[in-house]
Image: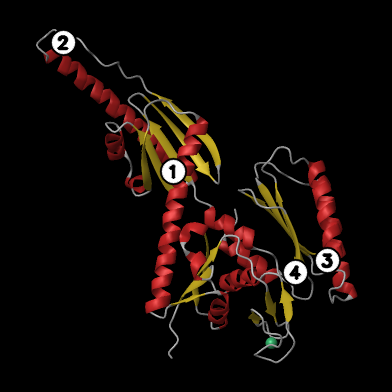
Amino acid sequence: MISHELILDLLKRADKRFPTTSLYLDLSSPKFTTRAAEILLKGMIKEKKRETQNWPLDREQRQSMAGDFSRLSRYSTTELDRKGSKGIAIFSASGSGLWEVFPLPGPVRNVLSVDRDPYIRPLTMLLDEYKRYCTVFVDRGGARVFAVCLGEIEDHSQILDEVPGQVKASGWGGYEERRIERHIEDHVRRHLRHVAEVTYDFFRQRKFDRLIIGGQSDIVPEFERQLHSYLKERIVARVGVESAISLDEALKRTTEVDREIEKRADKELVRQLLENAKSRGMGVLGLRAVLGALRRSQVHTLLIEMGYVEKGVVCDACGFIGTSDEKCPLCGKKTREIPDAVEATIRETLRQNGRVVHVGTESGLGDEGRIGATLRFKLSA
Ligand SMILES: [Zn+2]
């Protein structure tokens, strides 16, 4: 599984002497056969060769890059392992012996990149989105437990406990009816306890982050009472459900809840950032200010609007990253243009052990420069 440590380790291992070739392939569609992958990659490599033709690379660096291309082609035709993974990320720098293959839990955009550093934005986006849900739909006699993660649903278990039907007749002045009803309630309670146990077992196996409970309003509170405290604290939503639910419907309901939670969380993060930036001097907004904060190792949490890409410059002599300076303001050497300085901010933030969060377009960050960061400390004026 991808993790902060894994990405950091990859950044550390990439050798600046040789360019790193990064390949992402979306394997989520069954139509994307090995043959399709081969054709796609061939086209991407051709394009990349044309693009890098005039780059100031020496003979060994070019050899390394050519080595990456041929190994990737070979891999896509012979070893492309898609078992259970929705995507794949491969990082290669044959000159220094770097070769890393990461199966991905969610779909990605197909990309081939050649750069000094590994291209990691898609990895950090997956890491950010990776929330494991458990969704339980429960009624008086049955229950279904689903696992949902990154748009994928898995039917974990279906529970059917024998619960006697509800009684209607009352012949004994209501006494018998009440007795029978009590008997049913005991059954229902036992059933709910059973479902709670199954859910807890599932939690111990899979360690999901969030729990959604669906059911009729008279059942849900009783079910919640039966849940282990670990599970109670993971409940993020309760959804009303009248009858049995299909797999598709369960996925739809879970996805809706997830979107809502993420949207709220994004908005809250942006709100905190604005408060920090505007009144406390503990935040910065806009690419230029973020790059400045990164140079001072100040960044605690980097917020980026999804899809935000901005050209920039880098100084190969000292590592300075800027937005437009032709000459490096730190060492005076000539800078080099890079297609995306936002990618560089992600890398630097991770290197400084900061957190990277990708927020949606409705988060409000769009009006504030599309990028910002909360800071670890304030600079004295
Ligand atoms: Zn410099």
**Quarter holding residue 70:** bottom right
Cα distance between the residues tagged 2 and 3: 84 Å
Report the residue at 67% width, 69% height from top.
340
Q: What residue type is labelled 4?
A: Asp
Residue named by callout 1: 203
Find out whether the residues at labels 1 and 2 contact each other: C-beta distance under 8 Å.
no
Question: Which type of secondary structure does the marked residue at label 2 adopt?
Answer: loop
Is residue 205 visible to the viewer in this orientation of the structure?
no
Q: Which amino acid does label 2 sit on?
A: Ser
Dot 4 or dot 3: first in sequence order is 3
Mark pair 4, 2: CA separation: 80 Å
Q: Distance between the residues labelled 4 and 1?
A: 41 Å
Amino acid on which the number 3 mark rests in the picture: Glu
Circle 2 residue: 170
* Left or right: 66, with 33 as reference point: right
Query: Of the residues tagged 4 and 3, which is closer to the observer?
Result: 3
Residue farthest to the right, as pictured:
59
User: As rendered, which of 12 and 55 lies closer to the eye?
Assistant: 55
Image quadrant in which the C terminus is located: bottom left
Q: Give x and y (percent) for residue 258.
A: 46, 47
Query: Which numbered tag is attached to residue 51?
Result: 3
Per the rendering, the mark at residue 115 is: 4
Q: Where 193 falls versus 123 (above or below)?
A: above
Among numbered discs 4 and 1, the one appearing first in the sequence: 4
